[in-house]
Amino acid sequence: MKGNRKWQILAQERTCKHTEAIHKLGFINWRMKSNARFAIGDTIYLFMSDSRSVRYEMMVAAQNCKREDQEFWTETPREGLTYKFKFLQKYKGNLLSEAELEKHGLKHNSMQNTICNNKPLLDYIQSIFYNESIK
């Protein structure tokens, strides 16, 4: 089944250099786990811990994959099968900073969790990427 959900997830740059992996590989691997059931075709917005902002729009391209991004990890990557998140676009402005996202429904205590049920927040993020891509 093709996915059409939107998610915001936290990418910890201190444990994995996601930005470098995206630039070099065009994707990142994300461990499959029970509390986040992504589907192929879902949109993923990466909230980057270093910039405290959403910088990447990704798409779930595959599941049950072996990890291919281990060279970018600063610690031992978690074992197990992964999703493959394909790079779609990067946002370079400041409208997706943590402070801006809080104005649109981001709750600070939710940052450690995947977010998929906060429609106003995810619609706002999508609108920023959409408006950026049509310029």
Image (cartoon, rainbow, N blue to C red):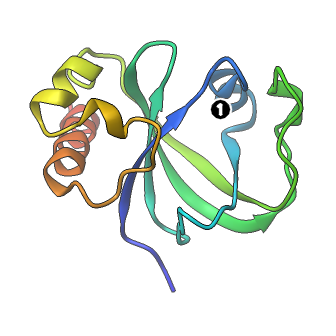
Please determine whether, in this image, residue 8 is positioned above or below residue 97: below
Residue visible at 72% across and 29% down in the picture = 21
Tell me residue 20's x, y (percent).
Answer: 70, 21
Mark 1 Cα-neighbour bin, 10 Å: few <14, some 14–19, many ≥20: many
Residue visible at 54% across and 69% down in the picture = 37
Residue visible at 17% across and 43% down in the picture = 127
46 with respect to 6 (left or right) = right
What kind of element bears circle 1?
A: helix
Tell me residue 53's x, y (percent).
Answer: 36, 22
Q: Quadrant of residue 91?
A: top left
Q: Amino acid at mark 1?
A: Ile
21 with respect to 58 (left or right) = right
Q: Residue furthest bottom?
A: 1
Q: Quadrant of the C terminus?
A: top left
Tell me residue 60's x, y (percent).
Answer: 56, 60
Q: Quadrant of residue 13?
A: top right
Residue visible at 54% across and 63% down in the picture = 35
Please determine whether, in this image, residue 116 is positioned above or below residue 58: below
Please determine whether, in this image, residue 19 is positioned above or below residue 45: above
37 with respect to 45 (left or right) = right
Total marks placed: 1
Q: Nearer the viewer, residue 49 or 123?
A: 49
Tell me residue 46's x, y (percent).
Answer: 47, 37
Q: Nearer the viewer, residue 34 or 29?
A: 34
Please determine whether, in this image, residue 72 is positioned above or below residue 125: above
Q: Nearer the viewer, residue 101 or 29?
A: 101
Which residue matches tag 1? 22
